[in-house]
Amino acid sequence: MKKITLLFLFLTVSLGYSQVVLEDFEGAAPTVNLTNGLGSATITTDPVAGPNGNVLEIVSAATGEAWQQADLIMQNNLIDLTTTKTVDVDIYSTTAINILARGEDKVFNTAPVTAADMMHNGTGWETLTFNFNVPKDGQSAANGEYSQISFFTCWVGNNAGNNATNDNWNDATSGITFYVDNITAVAGTALPIPTCTDGIQNQDETGIDCGGSTCPACPVPPTTPAPTPPARPVADVVSIYSDAYAPGITFDAFDADWCGSPAYTEVMISGNNTLQKNAGIVCHGINFESDRQDLSGFTHLHFDFYTTDTDLTGDVFNTKLVDWGFAPTGATQTALEVNINTGTSPAIVANMWISVDMDITTLGGSVGGNLTRTDVAEFGITTAMVDNVWYDNIYLHKNTLLSTEDFNKITFNVYPNPSQNNWTIKTANVQMETISVFDVLGKQVLTLSPDASEVKVDASNLKSGLYFAQIKTESSINSIKLIKE
């Protein structure tokens, strides 16, 4: 009898930790997010018309980041990696590829981010076992329940990649394709559960973590955009975020996940791109350590923000330039900070755009910290106690403006703009030597050397959105805004 009881207990425990198929794409379609410029992630049929039925096709894009990924959001149960730390996934590929999978907990926000890789031999359908007890990509071993699993297309591992920033990755390229099915693991907490703090728009939410039947109402954006910045000499501006100026920095991570991610949602206000703080997020970090900036010659920091908070007690809108002091990491960093609250000038006021244009050459008043800014690698925004806030036009400048003569010296005609396929840029009185096109995150996506007064710019391979063309002539550098439909 004792042996039978022990056997029963053993079977009970074993069944409690048994793995089941948590997603096979046969029922209601799950949410799959494209992150960091992934080409596509589409639920389709088995590529070899086999028994797998519906599967998830993941395709890379050359215009994305090296670490582009498909984020699969679990819809029936969380993935429980508390005890059994492996996930089995059926993956189809006709070429050998090392696939990185990453687990994140965006429901309870208690489990550490974890990642594991597994080599696919390119033989068609293979069942890969990802062991999250042996973490990769600098992440932690799994411990807890996970609401999403992500699959990366350009991972190599073992420092064998060709990406200059991180040699565990290859540079982005088009057409890397594999298919995913039968996500198998120990079933965790049943879904749905309230998702008002998971950083994604799901269930019946009308925005990220807001709206719908269970989450707070989504904030209503301002009806008017932030004030348009003045025309300044291109060399006298370094833009971090603004439709008015071409990006002056190439970012490693425009959302560096300092206080949770995503930190913001980009919204359109009267045709102007604007950043809206996401619910529950208290800061937004921006990293550009691979393109560090000497900003010692720039005298002013500008930003605009708008809040609808009714209680402004304790509200602070803080920005900081983080200088790494030419160290390989930020271990010895210093920061120059600009703090705006209800007692500063300007002060936080509800329901109006606050334009801050602060002299950062001396400490005092709203300017604190350290004036050193010769090796700036990061920019941070802290919104302590501010619940609903939008911000725009973050840039540094030398307090100079274009004269009327300079402003009228060169005129550019762009058509069509917006465009679906290409833009024609034309000037009547000057040759355009080079044209560099940047996306809103500062990544150069096109470059031309026309040496002509009229040029056609092919936009057919670009994603829809806002771009900036930086045009170099014999006498100046100018920026114009381009929109791809």
Image (cartoon, rainbow, N blue to C red):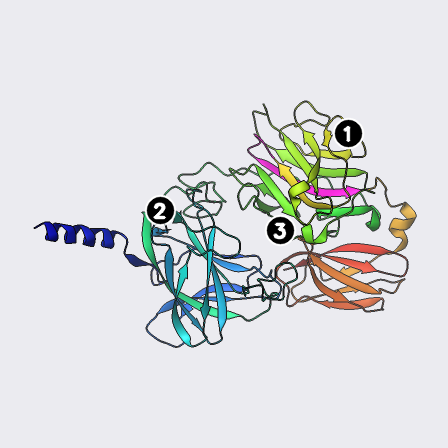
Mark 3, other Cα within 10 Å: few <14 / some 14–19 / many ≥20: some
Question: x%, y% of residue 402?
Answer: 87, 46
Q: Which mark is residue 363?
A: 1
- Residue beneath the point at 67% across and 45% down: 378
Which residue is denoted by mark 3 in the rendering? 253
Secondary structure character of the magenta stretch overall? strand
Mark 1, other Cα within 10 Å: few <14 / some 14–19 / many ≥20: some
Sequence order check, earlier mark of 1 and 3: 3
Whether residue 388 is in magenta: the answer is yes
- Residue beneath the point at 39% across and 71% down: 126
Of helix, strand and loop, which one carries label 1?
Answer: loop
Residue 223, can we see it? no
Whether residue 322 is in magenta: the answer is no
Q: Given the image, on which type of amino acid does mark 3 rest?
A: Ala
Quadrant position of residue 181: bottom left
Cα gap from disc 1 to disc 3, whole angstroms: 29 Å
Q: Given the image, on which type of amino acid does mark 1 rest?
A: Leu
Q: Which mark is residue 192?
A: 2
Q: Residue 73 carries which label?
A: none
Sequence order check, earlier mark of 2 and 1: 2
- 58 displayed left or right of 402: left
Question: x%, y% of residue 481?
Answer: 73, 55
Q: Given the image, on which type of amino acid does mark 2 rest?
A: Pro
Q: Which of marks 2 and 1 is in front?
A: 1
- Residue beneath the point at 81% across and 34% down: 361
Quadrant position of residue 173: bottom right
* Residue range of the region highlighted in magenta in the rendering: 383-397
Question: x%, y% of residue 263?
Answer: 56, 43
Can you say which quadrant of the picture contains the C terminus?
bottom right
Residue 172, can we see it? yes
Of helix, strand and loop, which one carries label 3?
Answer: loop
